[in-house]
Amino acid sequence: MDDTDALMSIGAFARRVGLAPSALRFYDDCGVLRPATVDGATGYRYYTPDQEPRALLVRRLRQAGIPLTDASAVLDGSREEARTVLEEHARRARETAASARSAIGEILRELHGGEHRTTARIGGAELAGAVRQVAPAAASGPGREEFPALGCVLIELDHQEVRLVATDRYRLALRALRPSSFEGDPCRVLTGVPELREAASWAMRLPELVVEADRQGVRLLGDRTVHALSPVEDTFPDYRLILDDLPTPGHRIIADRAALRTAVAEAGHDGPLTLRTEGERLIRVSCGTVTSRVAALCTGPPLRIAFDPGVLLPALDAGVGPDVLLEISSPVRPVVVRSADQGSFTTLVMPVADPSADR
């Protein structure tokens, strides 16, 4: 069969790959997707079937909003170059989406003028447990005085979840609750820790309650009682950017939570403690003198990382179940502390400089 039998006109090729003929002309002019041949007399462009995979990839890259300057690295660069470009674009897209979501939420709340109410129905014991886990991560003392928003708990309500979030910059705690019903638009309210803890003590004995939120604050309704939580007018950090920016962990440590907690508590609070992995053992070194060994399952290369015991200990206390999982990307990036028995609760703990690294 003559090679010209396999040639397709620009219109036929456009229909085959889902691109407009005008787009194919543009990609030709940019050098991204050249036709197989161009008729010298008519200027008509012709394509071959083996160009289809590249055309489909171009279409997918453009649908993802990737500029042609970056798309060329994916099309013609190495796998490593392509991976770098795509991961960087995904990061920018997440940041843009988070900023847009926050801005739109603020505008919607202003449009409603404080009259609109959002309600979600959740379990009372679940809310009390969430407050117990999250509230200790809020800032206290000088940190709260310098940044009042960090001394609060953020309550977010949307159709899928009711989230409680707190951070003091060294630890971040997030608990997500699944509402049995939801009405209204997504909203977020900052509230103080003492009154939230007081409300949690009341909510603990209720099988179910209603969380009602508007610009006047949050109210918990149940058992013919209303607990009002006053709003705090301040800006809470965009915790989603922190979570989305977490790299893939290169180390995972699974240990008995009580045993690890005991080892950390025995270290005291005189200075940083160092965790060092060796095979399937987790070794804790405190100030280079006292050493405790805790059985653990460790994946990844040998690791040495230091923590402030006063930050790590509350994170372990807030967990649920017998096991704790530490996901670590590097000794200087936030460490994710999870529980196998409760995927709805996540804590991030910041490491500190290892004082024994040079010994």
Image (spheres, rainbow, N blue to C red):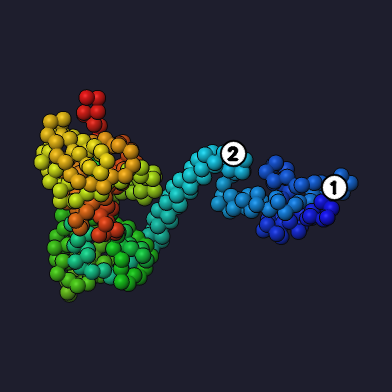
Closest to the observer, 76 or 175 = 76
Q: Position of residue 102 (x, y in %)?
A: 40, 53
Whether residue 304 sits left or right of residue 76 in the image: it is left
Residue under pointer 2: 77
Query: As displayed, is residue 140 above or below residue 131?
Result: above
Q: Amino acid at mark 1?
A: Asp
Residue under pointer 1: 39
The quadrant in which the N terminus is found is: bottom right
Instruction: Please report the residue visible at 48 percent of the width from the left and 44 percent of the height from the top.
Output: 87
- Mark 1, other Cα within 10 Å: few <14 / some 14–19 / many ≥20: few
Residue 188 appearing in the image: yes
Closest to the observer, 73 or 91 = 73
Q: Position of residue 61 (x, y in %)?
A: 58, 50
Dot 2: what SS? Answer: loop
Whether residue 349 sits left or right of residue 69 in the image: it is left
Instruction: Please report the residue visible at 72 percent of the width from the left and 56 percent of the height from the top.
Output: 14
Q: Disc 2 to disc 1, how far (Cα)?
A: 30 Å
Q: Position of residue 116 (x, y in %)?
A: 35, 66
